[in-house]
Amino acid sequence: MVGEKSRSGRYEGLVRDCFRSGGYVFAGRPGEIAQKEGISRIARLGSNENPNPPARGAVRLGCAALNEANRYPDETMELLVQSLAQTYGPDSFVTGVGMDGVIETMIRTLVNPGDRVSVSTPTFSFYGLAAKAQSAEVVPVPRSEDYSVDPGLFIKAARNSKISFLCSPNNPTGTVTPVRDVIEILSEIDGILFLDNAYVEFCSVDYLPLMEEHENLVIGRTMSKAYALAGARVGYAFVPAWILPYYHRASTPFTLNSVSAQAAMGALADRESMEAYVRYVIMWRERFSRECGFPVSPSGANFIMADVAPWSGDAMVRELARRGIIVRSCAGFPGLPDHFIRVSIGAEWENELFLKEIRSIREEKQGAP
Ligand code: PMP
């Protein structure tokens, strides 16, 4: 219960400075937009989700696990780790509540207050938020004009950093970093490189062989995108074996719940559905790029980033919302100008609606945002 004195704000001074403002920015809420615009069916293209339901095996195993949810999960996540090893090879794995959970725990494992954390920017915001929550000094490392990573610049910053974050394919630009650039970076830095591969299934680059040679590489993955389990919150990472005991000390006692872990195993077993979705994404990604009428950056992910100038990203998001479509403005991504939007590949009807409406916005209001 909230007491009188809390309502007066008297205790808010107790909150740490880093949480007084800011925080993660979420996509628009479909229910709210539907109500505001009086539209019953909203196209959800704002969060890079898989529009299909999870694999049947994922639902079956997840439901079965609920029957035993009176027990705590296996803290080692042995069965899930075995499934991952069967799918990807015998690496060392850690798990977390989404890749977000893995990122947070990895930072807790390594970063003391005041340590440096470098982030290749513009990119996913949570690295910086999690690092600041650990009282790190966050160093943004700007990408080049075409959003590629400049290895020399990145190395310079990452040399003085405990851990550095590089996202490939990058959110929100879609940019894929060549393996040779990652190798150059790994060989030149002293700290850990966290390579965020949330969208790796949608591109043709495979960074996994690098795990063999580099003891300072962590590759973060998620079941939220290609495997359609965003709501189950399952993330994992390939890690060098030496880090395992430390990660487990830094994490909450149970990194994942048993229902999500079983669902993830069911999803991993259905490679065919995942691959069919990837083919579908690639086909639509090309159509979006060709047909949306605005310049689109090359993308290796399940979304595209479009330059909607002379509209601002925020204005375009509002205009599309009026027409029942949620996309993400990139205005909140530090390091990007304010005239970009990020659009996820959704279900067939959502994609068709987006193309129709964005073309009509462009034609109706040529040059007049
Ligand atoms: N990394 C990137 C680049 C992402 O875009 C996201 C989710 N939007 C995540 C990590 C977090 O994924 P998860 O759902 O597994 O927490």
Image: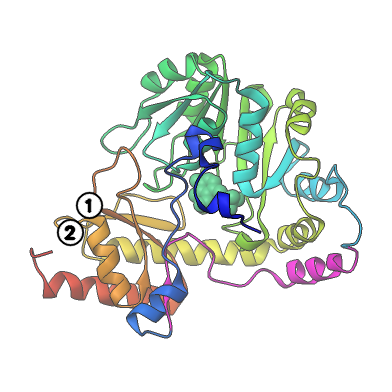
Task: Check if residue 63 falls in the magenta segment.
Answer: yes
Give the percent coordinates (x, y) of residue 47.
Answer: 47, 60
| Local SS, label 1 | loop
Report if the beta carbon of the residue with label 1 is closer than 8 angstroms to ligand 1. no
| Local SS, label 2 | loop
Q: Residues within 10 Å of mark 1 (few under 14, many from 20)?
A: some
Taking the spot 42% from the left edge, 18% from the top edge, the residue there is 157
Quarter of the image with the C terminus is: bottom left
Q: Determine whether 182 is above or below 272 in the image.
A: above
Q: Which of these two is toward me, 237 or 75?
A: 75
Q: Which of these two is toward me, 42 or 19?
A: 19
Report if the beta carbon of the residue with label 2 is closer than 8 angstroms to ligand 1. no
Q: Quadrant of residue 232?
A: bottom right
**Residue 311 - label:** 2
The answer to whether residue 239 is left or right of residue 323 is: right
Taking the spot 51% from the left edge, 63% from the top edge, the residue there is 279
Q: Which residues are magenta?
A: 41-68
Tell me which label, 2 or 1, sits earlier in the chain: 2
Identify residue type, mark 1. His
**Residue 339 - label:** 1
Give the percent coordinates (x, y) of residue 253.
Answer: 81, 40
